[in-house]
Image: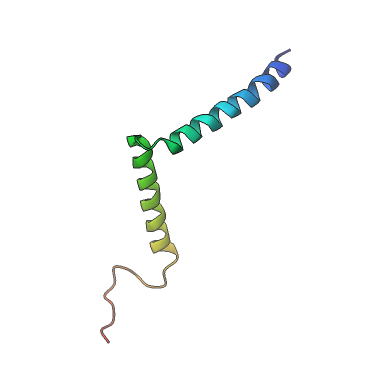
Amino acid sequence: MSAPSAKKSSPSSVMDWISSACHFATDRNDFRRNLLVNLGLFAAGVWVARNLSDFDLMSPQPVT
């Protein structure tokens, strides 16, 4: 008895989650969205700088 109701509520909850995520991503006046996007981009930049570069950013660079 609970399986059909769980099956029936699952697509609607997934659709609700998708619609709320789309609304959250497309709301241009949302401070939380801007903060999360900016922090995510900053974290991605830090990750790239730390993991994909061949040189240490804190070490002195050779003078040529």
Image height of 28 relative to 5, above or below: below
Name the quadrant of the C terminus. Answer: bottom left
Q: Is residue 22 left or right of residue 7?
A: left
| Residue 52, image x, y percentages | 45, 66
Q: Is residue 55 left or right of residue 20?
A: left
Instruction: Tell me what residue is drawn at x 38 percent, y 63 percent.
Output: 49
Image height of 15 relative to 2, above or below: below
Q: How many marks?
A: 0
Q: In this view, does 22 lie to the left or right of 50?
A: right
| Residue 44, image x, y percentages | 41, 54
Image height of 46 relative to 2, above or below: below
Image height of 12 relative to 28, above or below: above
Name the quadrant of the N terminus. Answer: top right
The answer to which quarter of the image holds residue 56 is bottom left
| Residue 8, image x, y percentages | 68, 20
Instruction: Tell me what residue is drawn at x 25 percent, y 84 percent.
Output: 63
Q: Which of 19 and 45 is in front in this view?
A: 19
Scheme of colours in the image: rainbow
Identify the residue at the far bottom of this view: 64
| Residue 9, image x, y percentages | 64, 20
Instruction: Tell me what residue is drawn at x 55 percent, y 32 percent.
Output: 18
Identify the residue at the far top of this view: 1
